[in-house]
Image (cartoon, rainbow, N blue to C red):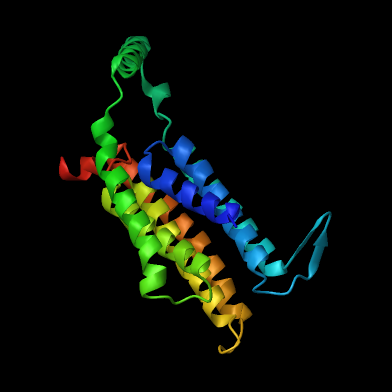
Amino acid sequence: MINWLLIGIGTTAAVILLFRDWRLTFPALLLNNIFLALFLAQQRFVAPDLRLPGLEISTLVLVKLICGIAVTLILTITALTFSREYGLENLDEFGLAELRRAARAAQRQRASTPFQLSDYVVPFWSGVLALLASLALPRIYPIAPSEGIDFAWYWLTLTGLLTIATASDLLKIGLGLLLCASAIDLLYTAVVSTPEASGLNVAPLGLLSAFNILLALAIAYLSGLLYGRLKTLELGALYGR
């Protein structure tokens, strides 16, 4: 039987790995968190204690969902903030005219620039290798109670690490770190909920959720530092100075 939530987790993580534009990757991160929360509710790691119209979920799943929304909002506000140009009030009319001319030239250049397939070769093939590894490792080295959970956390870990390795800006590195954090969260929740384990503890799960928010805030802070110094979030600017 096809588990569409697992497909959703895998697809959204692949979008984060492949694409550079935060307008695509941030919605993918939000959907990834939603699919993860629904997957946790489906696996019934925690007994449902909340009754919603047509749905019974646990408070833990709701907290993780709210945490995912908060993380996405923090990163989105950060991207919107540091994609603007400040200090325009200090320019005279000649400076503003030159800035408008440069903006029009840049827009024409982006419109005439063909799709660069080479920019996606490394992320694509690394994603293919990660997919093969995520399908094989649950059979070779199973850790979680089910093969589906093993696939999910292996896939999130590998795509997170590859996202960090192929990142060209600071926000993309943050996305990779958040994928790795989601993988650890999922694995811990699955392993400690087994009958042989001691059972779920609220404190570690709360710390994991808080860690995601703190990680997003740290990414926002570092983005502010980088943008304040170099007026860009591109990592290549660090090597050009």
Work out whether 87 lies above or below 113.
below
Give me the residue at 38% from left, 54% from top: 176
Residue situated in front as seen by the camera: 210 or 135: 135
Quadrant into which the N terminus falls:
bottom right
Q: Can residue 241 be seen in this view?
A: no
Quadrant into which the C terminus falls:
top left
Work out whether 60 lies above or below 79.
below
**Would residue 8 be found to the left or right of residue 93 on screen?**
right
Q: For residue 194, which quarter of the picture? A: bottom right
Work out whether 228 lies above or below 182.
above
Q: For residue 2, which quarter of the picture? A: bottom right
Count of picture labels: 0
* Residue 100 percent coordinates (x, y): 36, 13
Toward the front, the furthest residue is 1
Q: Is residue 102 visible?
A: yes
Give me the residue at 66% from left, 64% from top: 42
* Residue 152 percent coordinates (x, y): 48, 62
Residue situated in front as seen by the camera: 64 or 238: 64
* Residue 167 percent coordinates (x, y): 30, 47
**Would residue 63 be found to the left or right of residue 73 on screen?**
right
Give me the residue at 35% from left, 12% from top: 104
Residue situated in front as seen by the camera: 98 or 185: 185
* Residue 7 percent coordinates (x, y): 53, 51
